[in-house]
Image (cartoon, helix red, strand yellow):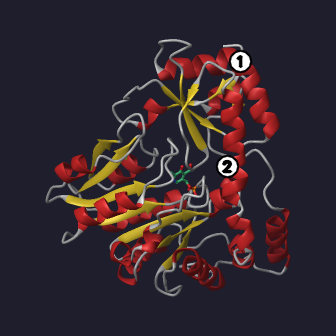
Amino acid sequence: MSALAAEYNAINLGQGFPDFQMSEELTGLVNEAMKNGFNQYAPMPGWMPLREAIAEKAAFLYNTRVNPETDITITPGGTYAIYSAFTTILQPADEVIVFEPAYDSYIPNIEINGAKAVTINLIYPDYRIDWQAVKNAITKKTKAIIINSPHNPTGAVISEEDIHQLRKIVEGTNIFIISDEVYEHLIFDNIPHQSILRYPDLLERSFVCFSFGKTYNCTGWKLGYCIAPALLTKEFRKVHQFNCFSCHTPTQVALATFLKNKEAFLSLSSFIQEKRDYFKQLMRQTKFSMKESYGSYFICGTYERISNESDKDIAVRLTREAGVATIPVSAFYQNGKDDKVLRFCFSKKKETLDAAVERLLKI
Ligand SMILES: Cc1ncc(COP(=O)(O)O)c(C=O)c1O
């Protein structure tokens, strides 16, 4: 959709990236690190002061103790952390439970390891997890469950009750959890983020993956990290050692300082929530019916008052004819399940959202 958006000069509300400037203080810190000579390989697990700052942040936010020496690995982005976690644990014929709609890297990451994704649909229209279906899907081959909250593409979030259900299902098994928490700070309406880091009994079997790109409005930086218990981290690093090996040094040096500024990550929710509310309000004038979004960069909408087309057809038509790109949610299902829903990214400047909605009004 981004390629089509570029071809038709459309406003791109498809791909999830902010179109506003990131923190100048943070870019200044990267510049300073470069000028101060931090331009050679960082240690394989990551720049130690950054790992220490992450451990402090985890203690502050989730009241958990993670050891920077043994439990944290800096990675080139959240996606890489997820891929490495899968590669660490999967053997051919293993099964992984994946909830659909799903972020597009999960299933290819599972399959490239020779394992099988067992997909379970989130319950439409609220995109809640069907825990009975999860129970039914567990077999001797189930190696892991991957969860993602706040959720891309739907903006759904998991609750304490979901954690309770997850705990009941994995208790007494060897099932691993991969928790994609790249949107940990993009959660709205004062809902607490149910990080796996809060739950020591779950953390002991988990790889918890994060992204600085999402937290600091710099998706192009591709820097993130994985928190996992020492035994799992040791194995994870064997994959990392011969893949990326070591991440961009000056950004790690800069982030080690910037992470201490709590306000910078604590203020993100209200900043992005304002954009959600603004976009939702604007969309009331159009013929789209917007769903709830409790987190992430995204909000979904249906278009039954506009047409009966498939979500892919209307997404292509909106790009070509209205000049606004979105993503058809069917793209996040392996079987292309089409509930006639489009995903809109609202993490944009007001002018961008205004201009997009003005175009959508003509449809
Ligand atoms: C659910 C989810 N996980 C991971 C990522 C990727 O994070 P990163 O850019 O740090 O690899 C994204 C980006 O869109 C995402 O939506």
Residue 148 placed where, x, y %?
44, 54
Q: In the rendered image, which quarter contains the N terminus?
A: top right
Res 273 label: 2
**Rendered image: mark on residue 300:** none
Residue count near mark 1 (Cα–Cα under 10 Å), binned few <14, some 14–19, many ≥20: some
Q: Position of residue 346 (x, y in %)?
A: 67, 40
Q: Is mark 2 within 8 Å of ligand 1?
A: no
Badge 1 is on which residue?
361
Q: Residue at x 35, y 72 (%)?
A: 202
Question: Between marks 1 and 2, how big is the CA–CA gap?
Answer: 23 Å
Up/down of 171 relative to 114, above or below = below
Q: Amino acid at mark 2?
A: Gln
Residue shown at 29% from the left, 44% from the top: 119
Q: 302 or 348: nearer the eye?
A: 302
- For mark 2, give the secondary structure: helix
Q: Is residue 9 visible?
A: no
Where's residue 193, x and y in %?
A: 52, 62
Q: Using a 10 Å C-alpha cutoff, classify the residue at mark 2 as few (fewer than 14 neighbours), some (14 to 19) or many (20 or more).
A: many
Q: Earlier in the sequence, mark 1 or mark 2?
A: 2
Q: Is residue 292 above or below residue 86?
A: above
Q: What's the residue type where badge 1 is placed?
A: Leu
Residue at the extreme left of the image, as rendered: 140
* Residue at the image position 42 percent from the left and 39 percent from the top: 126
Q: Quadrant of the C terminus?
A: top right
Q: Is residue 296 above or below residue 76?
A: above
